[in-house]
Image (cartoon, rainbow, N blue to C red):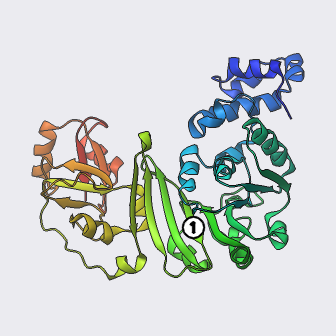
């Protein structure tokens, strides 16, 4: 499976175009000559890769699969983060849900022998081409269902899974039991044959419920990119006792915010609630909110919470290392008619956020006439 020079030239010349419009412009002769369905898939794939995994994009020999595989694939940023989870001395690696191969490509470079397992034969063919194109060494491609492969798998250091999150009808699913493979069904075999099992789940998954469903969860990593929650990583080990949560936010420039805590600590903490608003307001990043570190973050950074359900914090001293956004408070007021009128006399544009407030952002804009944007941030809570 290789791109011809003619195909590569056409892709380069048209990769900025909308693929649907491009399909309508090609005459029948050109469509047959180029294998248009395949070419349009490559153009669409490169458009995705440019932002999501640029190390694929820069190589024009890379072949791209159907859009669904690109959609579920990890970004280059989150794949690189997974490298930090590999213990020293590990030599063998198995990816049981190979897919597009982004995670496999990056993770396999840390091992002597890596096995890519995928039940879709076309994905296996594409992966083999891409791995050779990228110069990977010490890899094996197996066209097999993960459940079948696990039964005969040799002992290995690390196993990675990214279960498919679509059912037979193509609908999105979230629960562990609805994903394929169902990790809860094969976890005993995995823990018997691997020192470390790393499983990627949707950020929509309920973490506490998943920890209860799975055995021997040593760590949960909630991973965001630029404050947008992208994936949950569950680390399983037969030696696991307590579970540690890591709230991770990957920022541009390689800066990484990491906040760790345990659910037991979070439940046992008692924190003070403020009676007034200090000079600074804090909004935790998306990973901390998803992980549920509401009291732990307040204690560690010595900030006070506004309300049990608001998840906003305040202090008089600026905490520049706080994992999230920090705002300087210019004013605060009770939202009665007089105060709102006074505020609107000086402010015509604002970024609005709602936390535990009876009105939505859209309703506040409609009632106040505030336009979106500007340097002012209005928190309604």
Question: Which residue has dot 1 on it?
Answer: 234
On the question of residue 317 being in view, the answer is yes
Residue 295, percent from left and from top: 30, 71
User: How many numbered badges does the structure rendering display?
Assistant: 1
Quarter placement of the C terminus: bottom left
On the question of residue 65 being in view, the answer is no
Residue 15, percent from left and from top: 67, 24
Residue at the front extreme? 89
Instruction: Give the answer, above or below, for where 196 lies relative to 264.
Output: above
**On the picture, is 62 further left or further right than 343?**
right
Q: Nearer the viewer, residue 310 or 223?
A: 223
Instruction: Give the answer, above or below, for where 375 lies relative to 172.
Output: above
Instruction: Give the answer, above or below, for where 244 lies relative to 33.
Output: below
**On the picture, is 143 further left or further right than 196?**
right
Q: Residue at x 60, y 35 (%)?
A: 54
Instruction: Give the answer, above or below, for where 235 lies relative to 76.
Output: below
Residue 304, percent from left and from top: 20, 66
Q: Residue at x 50, y 63 (%)?
A: 221
Q: Residue at x 52, y 70 (%)?
A: 219
Q: Secondary structure at mark 1?
A: strand
**On the picture, is 17 further left or further right than 229?**
right
**On the picture, is 100 further left or further right than 276?**
right
State the image quarter where residue 8 is shown. top right
Q: Residues within 10 Å of mark 1 (few under 14, many from 20)?
A: many
State the image quarter where residue 186 is shown. bottom right
Q: Residue at x 76, y 35 (%)?
A: 133
Q: Nearer the viewer, residue 257 or 350?
A: 257
State the image quarter where residue 344 is shown. top left
Residue 151, percent from left and from top: 83, 73
Quarter placement of the N terminus: top right
């Amino acid at each position: 499976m290789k791109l011809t020079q003619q195909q590569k030239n056409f892709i380069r010349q048209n990769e900025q175009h909308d693929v649907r419009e491009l399909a309508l412009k090609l005459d029948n002769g050109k469509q047959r000559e180029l294998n248009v369905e395949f070419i349009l898939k490559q153009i669409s794939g490169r458009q995705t890769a440019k932002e999501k995994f640029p190390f694929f994009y820069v190589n024009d020999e890379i072949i791209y699969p159907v859009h669904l595989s690109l959609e579920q694939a990890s970004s280059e940023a989150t794949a690189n983060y997974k490298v930090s989870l590999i213990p020293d001395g590990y030599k063998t690696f198995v990816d049981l849900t190979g897919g597009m191969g982004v995670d496999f490509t990056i993770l396999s470079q840390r091992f002597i022998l890596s096995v890519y397992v995928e039940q879709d034969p076309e994905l296996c063919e594409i992966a083999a081409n891409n791995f050779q194109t990228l110069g990977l060494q010490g890899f094996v491609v197996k066209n097999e269902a993960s459940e079948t492969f696990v039964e005969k798998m040799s002992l290995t250091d690390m196993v990675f899974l990214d279960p498919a999150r679509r059912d037979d009808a193509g609908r999105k699913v979230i629960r562990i039991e609805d994903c394929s493979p169902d990790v809860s069904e094969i976890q005993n075999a995995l823990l018997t044959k691997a020192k470390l099992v790393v499983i990627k789940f949707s950020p929509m998954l309920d973490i506490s419920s998943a920890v209860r469903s799975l055995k021997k969860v040593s760590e949960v990593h909630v991973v965001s990119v630029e404050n947008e929650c992208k994936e949950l990583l569950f680390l399983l080990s037969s030696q696991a006792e307590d579970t540690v949560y890591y709230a991770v936010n990957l920022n541009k420039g390689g800066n990484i915010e990491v906040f760790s805590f345990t659910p037991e600590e979070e439940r046992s903490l008692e924190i003070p609630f403020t009676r007034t608003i200090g000079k600074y307001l804090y909004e935790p990043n998306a990973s901390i909110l998803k992980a549920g570190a509401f009291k732990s973050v307040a204690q560690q950074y010595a900030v006070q919470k506004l309300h049990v359900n608001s998840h906003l914090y305040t202090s008089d001293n600026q905490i520049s290392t706080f994992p999230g956004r920090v705002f300087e408070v210019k004013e605060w007021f009770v939202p009665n008619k007089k105060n709102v009128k006074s505020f609107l006399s000086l402010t015509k544009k604002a970024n609005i956020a709602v936390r535990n407030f009876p009105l939505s952002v859209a309703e506040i804009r409609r009632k106040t006439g505030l336009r979106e944007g500007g340097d002012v941030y209005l928190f309604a809570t």
